Structure formats: structure tokens, C-alpha cells
Image (cartoon, helix red, strand yellow):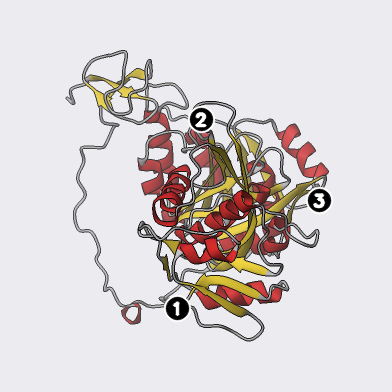
Amino acid sequence: MVKTATVYVCQSCGTVHAKWAGKCDGCGQWNTLLEESNAAPPGATKLKTGSKLGHLTFESLQGGSPAPPRLISGIEEFDRALGGGVARGSAILVGGDPGIGKSTLLLQVCGALSQTGASIAYISGEESVAQVRSRAARLGLADTDVQLAAETQLRTVLSGLKTLNPDLVVIDSIQTLWSEMQDSAPGSVAQVRAVAAELVRFAKKTDTAVLLVGHVTKEGQIAGPRVIEHLVDVVLSFEGERGYPFRILRGLKNRFGPTDEIGVFEMNEQGLTEVPNPSALFLDTRGSRAPGSAVFAGIEGARPVLVEFQALVAPSAYGTPRRAVVGWDSGRLAMILAVLEARCGVAFGGQDVYLNVAGGLKVMEPAADLAAAAALISSLAGAPLPDGAVCFGEISLSGDVRAIGRMDLRMKEAHKLGFTTAIAPQDANPIDGIALDGMRHLRDVVAKLGMTPTDEF
């Protein structure tokens, strides 16, 4: 007989403990350990032999193809984030904050795919069938051929799916499903891990694409053990700020396409609509720029996106100046301020500094250093940057402006939107229609805005 032992598993990070404790040794969270049994499921000890092996090259496989067949939804922003559509037999995990629009997006995807002739199943563990139908009616999808079910028992769900044999199934959400093979409660680490593994196994055996909706923690991480993200083929993050209508579908992991690709949507009364030109969404189009404003030409996946950096530098009323940043890394802001003071003689010691990425977009690129620095210097000097100018470039700790990747693509996007000048590293190659204002050192930007940098390095 298999010996049954009791362990305590952290519901936040999945760390296993031999005995109960108030604090998890893995993540430091309090009161997150729950008792679980580590007994192996029936049949787990039976070994199978004679696994069939195949050759690596596709030429040796009958009917083999170098690319998996895909389901094209026709929603270009969704297909773009997946690298060209939903690959058959893939497991896709979509995470996002509550109320951000995950269920709305996936219901619209189901409706679009059903119109192409694909067989679609939508399993809801959080809403009743009537509630899902009501939302579909609001989205104009009442007449689409999508099979609905409200079920949380895994065996019942898999039994129905094997009978229907759909091309795509949506599970909303994975935290609500439970397996009778586990003794723990639904939503626990053991349940989520077991359910995810069974659904991934079903996807691979039946060539059915499985879309899993995952809850997120208050830190923005997908709830449950990290093994779920390793099990699935694609991890998508659906992001957005409550006060803004746009939403961003960002690829974090993709075995069938590029990572860091994004799809941009706008939330309105009809649901989510695509935004084919995100640069126009994130830019202020009210004519001349105010001091403290700089346009950054960034890259999101394979797509260039122009976004506005806004800075405000004001005298501090307290002994400790405040540093606040939204949409950018606060550590890089601190680095830029230190470089400006140490290498350029521009002091921010008695100033409150506020930096914001317009539209609520989160920028991760080091290439945004020059745009952030230009916005800060512009606000401090009270001098706006030249009209029609975009900025991009990485700043080293010595103050040098370093070259970055795909500079020509950034300038082409800027030219398409009417910009005429690129404040960029001097190594950049100019293109037709864009004048290059090359910068060797951050002191060149300080001098350009009418300030007098020091010569102390």
C-alpha cells in the first residue's frame, strides 16, 4: 500500500512544509499553510513501457508540418498576441485583475471563431448559463453557435468535452474547478495543479485548444503554483488601468510564437474593440508640447508604439523630496536622477519629482531612459522640447547615450505619425523625413534645453 502522509502547502507560493507554521518559509506570507495529503492517485505507480519514439525532422513524419495548424479568430489584436492565432492542441493561460474584461474578451473570441465553422465550448465555473447568455446578448453574440455549460467538477467537464470533441474550449476559471482525486478544497494549490495538468493532458491527446482563465494575486501574479505557467504553452496577461478605457493583452510566454507581443483593445458599450494604431491612443494631439513632456518611440514585441512621458518637477515643501512614478520602473528613475546630478550637475535634491507614462501604459524598455531624462530636464528648465521631436536611447551610469535596437523602425513609426526630429544616440542612421539630432552624452540634452551643465564628471 502507498503510505499516506500529511503535508502543509503554502497557498501563495506552493512551498511544501512538513509541519504547520504561521509563516511560510518560501514567500514570507502569514497564515497561508493548508493541510493536504500527498498520497499518489490510483494507478500512479503503474509503469508503462514501450514508448514510441519518432525522428526529430519533419520529413520523416507522414503528414508532418513545421508549424502547428491554427484557429484564426479574425480578431487581429488577439491573433497577434498569440503569434498568428490559436494553435491546435495548445494550452493557453490568460490572467488579469478582476473586472478587467477577461471573460468578455474570451467570449468575443469564441463568437468570432464559431463564425469560422469551429466547434466551441465555454465552461463557466463562476457564472450560470443564464448570466453568460445575458453578457453574450449585450455583446451581440446571442446567435453564435457556442456550447455553454456551468460546471465545476473536472470529471463531468472532461466527460462532456470528450463527447462534444470541440476545436476550442474555454475554462472560466481554473481556480473554480476541482478534482475528486484531491482531498483539498477548490482553488487550493493541489487542486489547481492537478486540474491544470489534467486539462493540458486532454489538450495534447485530443488536439483541442484549451483557454484557461486564471485569477491573479494582489501583487499581479497568477494565483496558484508557478508550475501552472510551466505546464501551459502560452501565458497571456490582460492589463489595464481602471480609469482608462484601453486594455493590453501581453504575451509573457509562447511556445508557438514571439513573446512580449501585445494586442491593444478599447473597452466600450459594445465590449472590446481593436485598436489598430495604439500610438495615436497614447499620444497627446493638442498641438505644441508643454514643458516636461517627451514622446518616446518604443517597441512592444514586433510593433513600434509611441507614448508620451510626462514629468513635473516642483519645490518640495518637506524635508524629504518625494519621488513618484507611474508606468515606469522607479529604480530607473532614481538612477536617471543620480546620473543627472553626478555627471551633469543638475540637482533635484530639493525638488519633488513626478513621472507619468500617459495613458497608463507600462514601459519596460531601457531605451526609455533618454525620454524620461529629457522630460525631467524640460520640466526643471521650464523649456519644452522642440515640436515634432521623439526621444529614445539608453543612458549609462557615466551619462553616455548608448545605441539601442531597431532604431530605424522607431523612426519610421514616428515619421508616419508626423514627427520630424529624432533625439537619439549619435550612432543612429537617419531616414528620409526624420532629422537626426544625435546625442553623445546626457549633458548634450541639458545644453539643448538651455541649461548650463557643469564639467565635473
Q: Residues within 10 Å of mark 2 (few under 14, many from 20)?
A: few
Q: Is residue 172 left or right of residue 270?
A: left
Q: Residues within 10 Å of mark 1 (few under 14, many from 20)?
A: some
Q: Identify the residue shown where x is 32% and y is 21%.
A: 36
Q: Identify the residue shown where x is 51% and y is 36%.
A: 174
Residue 254, quarter of the rendered image: bottom left
Q: Check contact, mark 3 vs mark 1: CB within 8 A.
A: no
- Residue bearing the label numbered 2: 218
Give the structural element (helix, strand or loop) at label 1: loop
| Rendered location of residue 107, percent (x, y) | 68, 47
Tell me which amino acid carries mark 3. Answer: Asp
User: In the rendered view of the protein, which quadrant contains the N terminus?
Assistant: top left
Q: Could you tell me if residue 299 is visible in this image?
A: no
CA distance for labels 3 and 2: 37 Å
Tell me which amino acid carries mark 1. Answer: Asp
Tell me which amino acid carries mark 2. Answer: Lys
Q: Identify the residue shown where x is 44% and y is 56%.
A: 344
| Extreme residue toward the bottom, this view | 432
Q: Could you tell me if residue 97 is visible in this image?
A: yes
- Residue bearing the label numbered 1: 427
| Rendered location of residue 226, percent (x, y) | 37, 40
Give the structural element (helix, strand or loop) at label 2: loop
Identify the mark at residue 143; answer none if there is no mark.
Answer: 3
Ranked by sequence position, the earlier of labels 3 and 1 is: 3
Q: Identify the residue shown where x is 24% and y is 66%.
A: 53
Give the structural element (helix, strand or loop) at label 3: loop
User: In the rendered view of the protein, which quadrant contains the C terminus?
Assistant: bottom left
Q: Is residue 246 left or right of residue 450?
A: right
